[in-house]
Amino acid sequence: MEIKPKLAVTGYRGIWGESLSEQISFEYARGYAKMIASLPRSEKKKVLIGRDARKSGIKIFGSVSRALEKENIEIVNAGIIPTPSVLLLVKKLNFDGGVMITASHNPPEYNGIKFIVSPGRLTNEEEVTTIEKFRKNLTVEEKTPSISKIKEKKIDNTEFRKIHIDEIIKNIDADMIRNKRFKVALDPINGAGSIIAKELLEELGCEVYEINEMQDGTFAHEPEPLPKNLGQIAETTLESKSDIGFALDPDADRLVAVSELGQVISEEHTLALVVKNVLSKEPGDIVINIASSRTSEDVARTYGHKTFKTKVGEANVLSKMLEIGAPVGGEGGGGAIYPKINTSRDGLVCMGLILELMAKENKKISEIVETLPRYVMRKEKIPVVEKADVLFEKLKKVFPEARLTEIDGVRFDWPDLSWLSVRASITEPIIRIFGEAKTEERINSLFQTAMLTLNQK
């Protein structure tokens, strides 16, 4: 069953040359441009455009820039730069908006567009609806881009990178980190974080062993930063005798750590480690998405704070964080949000906060991870074979004893703290199944029932 991509709070993603093209990019960007042009803030609007290192990015940049210019919006080209950098720069430099050309952790054949609004956050559901309304109402003439070739040229974004690095440095105890003189292995997967991540670590006094550092978009492994994809950085961390290893996804908004023992730490623990550090100095309730590990929730509870859960999607988490004034939150896939620095998932901020935690506790990262609550988590994805709602109804019938939550697909919770979350992906034509339990036997049993119900072997 084919599902067509659509614009969501995470942006629009598609396979280049199939569900994403220069024309599709132009139309969505024109809809966004009309929304920005309608804002009352300034007479001449200005929008920042960045992109990750995927090779199709320059063509999408051409479509996006032409669409913005058609609405008399001035554009500033930030070149190849992380998504969180663009979000921070929109805020710090008072841009009216921003566009990030990236498919984040999706496979190499994908690309996409994330739309950003002032003061530096991704579009929410209401704004997505507005963009779609403008796009659907485009006239035939408005859908026609001017014909002009965009020549690829190297952009010097040194000053932009410095702004991001400086903002991180001034909001953590940089001197304490420098005094530890950490050795750090780094894998930015030849993506947008290749230059800035090393610069940040060196600014923090770290000795850096970097692999896959070319910004050429040729991913050295599957781009989603999951333990099964991170054998290279695990090996490099061990061989270089580093204190910790860091792996970024292609647009550097997600981070996974590797222990000094060469063991990849669960991507869910990136958020838990950041929560542990932040709550030790800034009290407050936290926000996570509904498919994130209980580990962060348990950490918050040890500090006497509650956890609020939202639909999956950075914009959804951030919206709730701003509503309740949460000092920290994020998504369990390696994306923490620390609004004191940046109102977005930020892999670079995560690096700084994890190093600060290690320095503050004067412990090895493996020792800190050992103190975290233990759960067994499993994640699977299956192709869409029928409508998601039909699948969800089947699951409700086989898990009638569980507590049901339906804010994003279906989530089932049991008294023994095990849970399952099943939802349709908003970035790929798949159903995602996440779950967690105290034992491997329990989570495997739940998954077996769920997969059989969904007609999967």
Image (cartoon, rainbow, N blue to C red):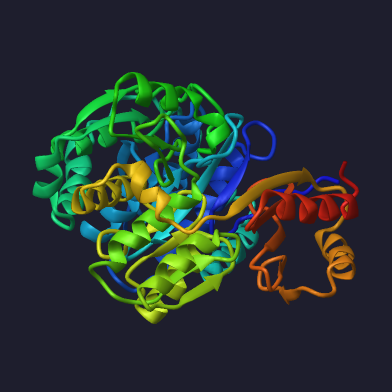
- Establish if 60 lies above or below 370: above
The image shows a total of numbered marks equal to 0
Give the side of residue 231 with respect to residue 80, left or right. right
Residue 366 percent across, percent down from the top left: 37, 42
- Establish if 16 lies above or below 232: below
Q: Which residue is found at the position 49% from the left and 66% from the top?
A: 288
Give the side of residue 31 with respect to residue 85, left or right. right
Q: Does any portion of residue 343 appear in the rendered image? A: no
Q: Does any portion of residue 33 appear in the rendered image? A: yes
Give the side of residue 264 with respect to residue 325, left or right. right
Comparing 406 with 342, the one in front is 406
Q: Which residue is found at the position 46% from the left and 62% from the top?
A: 296
- Establish if 29 lies above or below 417: above
Q: Which residue is found at the position 25% from the left and 71% from the top?
A: 282
Residue 136 percent across, percent down from the top left: 65, 60
Comparing 117 with 232, the one in front is 232
Q: Which residue is found at the position 57% from the left and 32% from the top?
A: 228
Q: Assign the C terminus to one quadrant of the image.
A: top right
Quarter holding residue 274: bottom left
Quarter holding residue 15: top right
Residue 145 percent across, percent down from the top left: 53, 42
Residue 213 percent across, percent down from the top left: 35, 23
